[in-house]
Image (spheres, rainbow, N blue to C red):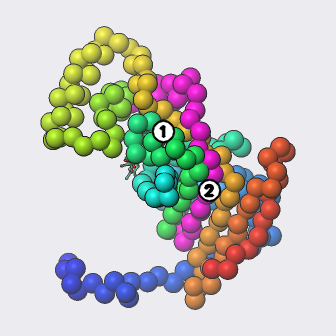
Amino acid sequence: MKNFSDIDIANLREDYQKQTLDVLDTKTDPIEQFKLWFQDAVNAKVIEPNAFTLSTASEGKPSSRIVLLKGLDEQGFRFYSNYNSKKGQEIDANSHVAMVFLWHGLQRQVRIEGLAYRLSQTESQTYYSKRPRSSQLGAWVSPQSTVIDSREVLEDKYKEVEERFKNTEVIPIPPFWGGYIIKPYKIEFWQGRTSRLHDRILYTLQKIEPKEWKRERLAP
Ligand SMILES: Cc1cc2nc3c(=O)[nH]c(=O)nc-3n(C[C@H](O)[C@H](O)[C@H](O)COP(=O)(O)O)c2cc1C
């Protein structure tokens, strides 16, 4: 067991040698490329491969947190949250967001920039109904991102909500909770390489209909 003072932070480093990435190895469509890498992350048993850092910004001040990817198709990346949360308020003010996936076991990172839109209530309800009942109740309980006096506030509210819905089979989705879709306009795939000469392939959206992407290599 090391004490903090024994840890030489400046000397913590990994050499990345697992794989390589070239423009010629990549798909023309970055969503297809993402699906391949996501599949690799699942097969490599990366823990929570769908966890990503979501950055939002309003008034020029960025903030980041981890959320879970819950769907992906040609339209974009879906996740769920509380619409009144800090991230929700920042997206209301500025729909430009950034995402980062880190699949450390594969020495890979994917960075995405795009525009976030709320999903329809019907789509959110479909996902909400598939969540465990305890998570459904939890969404009603938490005034996400607000200051609360104690943990008991949450536990008392949970009991109250449990009681309120005890005879309700299909719990309705809270009006302040739901999904977002992030429609990407930039997606970068990063593969760690030796000597810090990493591979970076950036896709930039050129045309929306039909979708056309430019692919370029970036210096590490
Ligand atoms: C692994 C992991 C997964 C998480 N998934 C979600 C999620 O899908 N949705 C969500 O709202 N918060 C999720 N959180 C909590 C957020 O990181 C954050 O604490 C919360 O959303 C409040 O953020 P905000 O105050 O910036 O809005 C997750 C946290 C971790 C560590």
Amino acid of disc 1: Tyr
Give the distance between the C-alpha atoms of the residues marked 2 and 1, in whole angstroms: 18 Å
Q: Quick check: 107 above or below 220?
A: above
Amino acid of disc 2: Glu
Residue at screen point 48% across, 54% down: 59
Q: Which residue position is annotated with label 2?
A: 113
Q: Quick check: 81 above or below 193?
A: above
Residue at screen point 66% across, 51% down: 184
Callout 1: helix, strand or loop?
strand
Whether the residue under disc 1 has CB within 8 Å of ligand 1: yes
- Indicate the position of residue 43 as horizontal and vertical percent values: 56, 57
Residue at screen point 37% across, 28% down: 136
Residue interval drawn in magenta: 106-132
Callout 2: helix, strand or loop?
strand
Residue 65: image quadrant is: bottom left
The quarter of the image holding the C terminus is bottom right
Residue at screen point 59% across, 62% down: 110
